[in-house]
Image (tube, grey):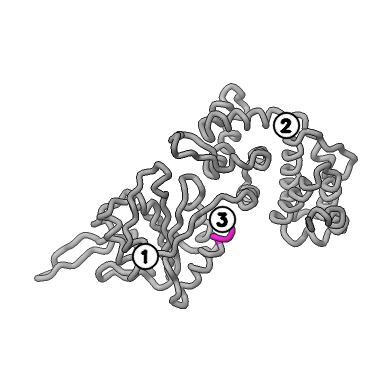
Amino acid sequence: MRPAHLLTVLGIEFQSTLDGHHTPVMLWGPPGIGKSQMVAQVAEEQNIDMIDIRLSQMEPSDLRGIPFRIEDRVEWAVPSMLPDSKRHGVQGILFLDEITSAPPSVSAAAYQLILDRRLGDYQVPDGWAIFAAGNRQGDRGVTYSMPAPLANRFSHYEVDTHLDDWVAWAFKNDIDERIIAFVRFRPELLFDFDPAHNPVAFPSPRSWEYSHRALKKFMDTPDLLLGSLQACVGQAAGIELKAFIDNLDNMPDLEAIVRGEKTSVPKEIDLQYAVATALVGHAIRAKNTDDAQEKFGHILNYAQKMPQREMGVMLVSDMHRAIGQDLFSVPQFSQWANSIADVMIY
């Protein structure tokens, strides 16, 4: 399932704790695809706490607690990491990450916590959702087969990559526009992981974020830039990204486009992707300014000039996802829509 849909599912599952309809959710997917980040995003959007427990680092007693004697009976000290209404709030997310990397003895200790929402005398607060995530056995991670009793305690979702969802996330999180443009240009490199070759560095949503950081740190030291990009996304993808960035010197004047001045469209496809992505970035930065509508209109006019109208559709679609309904009130929007009507219908 694509990330945008899964975020909706997780949000609804969290809200369902209030009416007693919550079902624990298990997210499956290869490393670096963004499973943990999606759960964190839901917590941020709902303005709630998220307790992240890495089960691969746990012992059974870490969940069950430590026994201690009171007179002639044994009590259990509840681990402080488990949700508590007074300390953590009445609502939140208990996230059991790396659950497929946990030894069977640890996953067995989580059975009652997941299904019955309790461990001994401990009770998970009613307003807390339970989500989990893990790698599949074919992903070359440290994984154990999920026992049937544990698997039957979850609803299961496979996390897929989706280019438009990643691009929307990247713009929202200020990922370097050159990275976004390159991934748009080479969409098959959004996630390129072959477990048979067991690569150390490979393209993934997580590693593209790392390459963004590398650009910020090493752009002014050219001798180190290529190596730092390869360290994030692998040798082949790193070389392609560096070549793509070097070619951006031939881009047209983006400020002139936003001002509405007559500017040609580059013939090279990679530069067209770069221009389209950079213009979306300009639109985002102009959103709350006094002349936003004017700038949006100039970008829409430029989109009509794209020799491949699908490129203009991509540009405007990314703008709409980034700035929302304000785009529809721009006079040039209807002109652009009419110019590509046959493409959209097809």
Residue picked out by circle 2: 248
- Nearer the observer, 231 or 310: 310
Left or right: residue 205 versus residue 145 is right
Query: Where residue 52 is drawn, which disc sits there?
Result: none
Query: Where residue 3 is drawn, which disc sits there?
Result: 3
User: What's under tag 1, amino acid-wise?
Assistant: Asn
Instruction: Find residue 132 and report its image quarter.
Output: bottom left
Residue picked out by circle 1: 152
Which sits earlier in the primary sequence, circle 2 or circle 3?
A: 3
Name the chief secondary structure element in magenta.
Answer: helix
Q: Residue at x 79, y 39 (%)?
A: 254
Mark whose residue sits in front, 1 or 2:
1
- The answer, for residue 291, to whether it is visible in the render is no
The residue segment tinted magenta is 1-7
Query: Residue 336: x, y in percent?
Result: 85, 54
Query: Residue 3: x, y in percent?
Result: 56, 55
Q: Residue at x 44, y 59 (%)?
A: 50
User: What's under tag 2, amino acid-wise?
Assistant: Leu
Q: Are marks 2 and 3 in contact (CB under 8 Å)?
A: no
Which sits earlier in the primary sequence, circle 1 or circle 3?
A: 3
